[in-house]
Image (spheres, grey):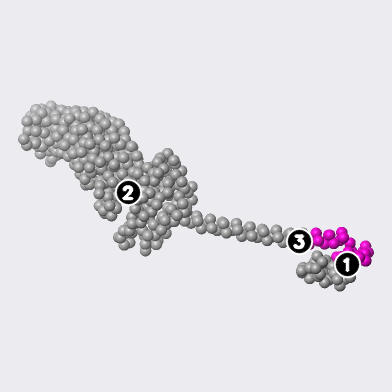
Amino acid sequence: MDDNQLRQPTSDNVYAGLDPEFVAAQDAVCMRDRTREGSREGGDDPRRSQNCREFFMSRLLAVCVGVIVVVIAAAVGAVIFNQHGRLRINPDKSTVPDLSTLLTTSTTSSAHLSVTSPATSTTSSTQLSVTSPSTSKTTDHWAEWTLYIREYFQQDSDAATGLEELYPDNVVVMALLEERFFWHWVCRYWKYNADDLPQTLSEAVIYGIQLGTSSDYMESHGFATYREFLSLALGALEALPNTTESLQNSDYSHYTSLSLSGLTLSDIDVEALANLFPYLRGVENLHLSHCGLSAEAAKSLAGQLHLPHALISLDLSSNNIGDDGLEAIAETFPHLKELWTFRVMDNSITNVGGRALAKRLVHLQELQKILLGRNELALSLSSLAKAFVNMTRLQTVGLWPITCRADSFRMAAQQVRDAVHTLEGQVRSIGSVLLYDASAGSRGRTWKSDAAWQRVEQKLTAGVHISNGKIKMALQIKVLEE
């Protein structure tokens, strides 16, 4: 084979189709070897041809490996970019506490979710499906939540963007969002609370109850009774995968008072409300005045009243709980050790209920104010005074007015005198004129005489003030007509 043949590719030439510069380089190598060692007339040394082939194959293999590496790198980059895009819609579920101690079946799977936009005051209903909280929420769930935010706020893009950015960092909100029932609560809370979010589950539930029992909400969501709304809220809460103490406790809480005063609540309404008390551990003030509460309603409350352990004010005034209802409430006093204020005015309570109350007041050593007026308690004053004197922080007692029947007035007056001596107090008229002095530092027997007491009896129907330097009692006895 001559040099010209080496430079021209043939069907038998292993260099056919290769780059000319590469072929030239191979020719030069072969020629140097031939010059050094000699050549054979019949062709090239087989070992030399083999070396050339091996050199070519190694270069080809290197090129293939390089192409494969580039393809793999491109695929990995595409996967990472796609995952990043998903995370913008589906927040890190590690921020949602993983609890499985409660029911895992969604109670709102077929419920209509109403979206009310403050911007237009219009309401639209959307049928949304809910997957079981026992499994991870799909990307669709969080994508729908994002769409819900934007539909709710509509033109207020700043509010929508702010909520989208902050909600994943709030463990309470992330837990609530597992159930679509709470989506409206979260959006409205954000809208009307200076771009803030609830810090405890208790705070969120307090806010939700106040919202859900409003006439606008009841009408727009088609609830005929408060029980319907409260029961649905309970079902949604029970379906959450996480409602532990970590969601109940916080150093800060915007909503600590639950007031349904003025709403007419039936016995079943109150029972449904009481069933929510496990989620109201942070409530400090419970106001249920002018609600038409019966004795049965009071008993339903009493059955769960030990759960809101932070309660400092309980207002049940202007209802109809009677002696039985008051006695049921009083049975819970050992669990209400932080209570500061107790109001049960105008509740059809008689001396029977008054004496039952007196036996339980010893448990309320933090109590500072108790209001008992407009009840028939004149003949239980002596028992109540014995309880009051042993309450270390009590400051205000409201007995304006309490009632008795005409034939019991003298007995009631004697009850007042016994109470004054138990308290070692002074009795003054409305104009602050001293009428009677049973204090330890009294200047003499004159102010404790029967004559002095006669002046007090004459003022009881107009009203007097009794004080011992620590407790101030406003007292008026109203005689009931036969």
Q: Depth check: 16 or 425 in front?
A: 16
Residue under numbered circle 3: 59
- Mark 2 and mark 1 lie on one chain; the one further toward the N terminus is 1
**Residue at x-position 32% and y-position 46%:** 232
What range is drawn magenta here?
28-56
Q: Which residue is mark 2?
A: 208
Q: Main secondary structure of the magenta part?
A: helix
Residue 59: x %, y % from top left = 76, 61
Question: Considering the numbered disc 2 on the image, is that residue within a helix, a strand or a loop?
Answer: helix
Q: Is residue 49 left or right of residue 182?
A: right
Among the two numbered marks 1 and 3 on one chain, the one whose residue lies closer to the N terminus: 1
In screen coordinates, is 306 left or right of 4? left
The residue tagged 1 is 31
- Magenta-span inclusion, residue 50: yes
Depth check, front residue: 355 or 420: 355
Q: CA distance from mark 1 to mark 3?
A: 21 Å
Nearer to the camera, 180 or 168:
180
Is 71 placed left or right of 329 in the picture?
A: right
Residue pictured at 70% horizontal, 60% vertical? 64
Quadrant of the image containing the C terminus: top left
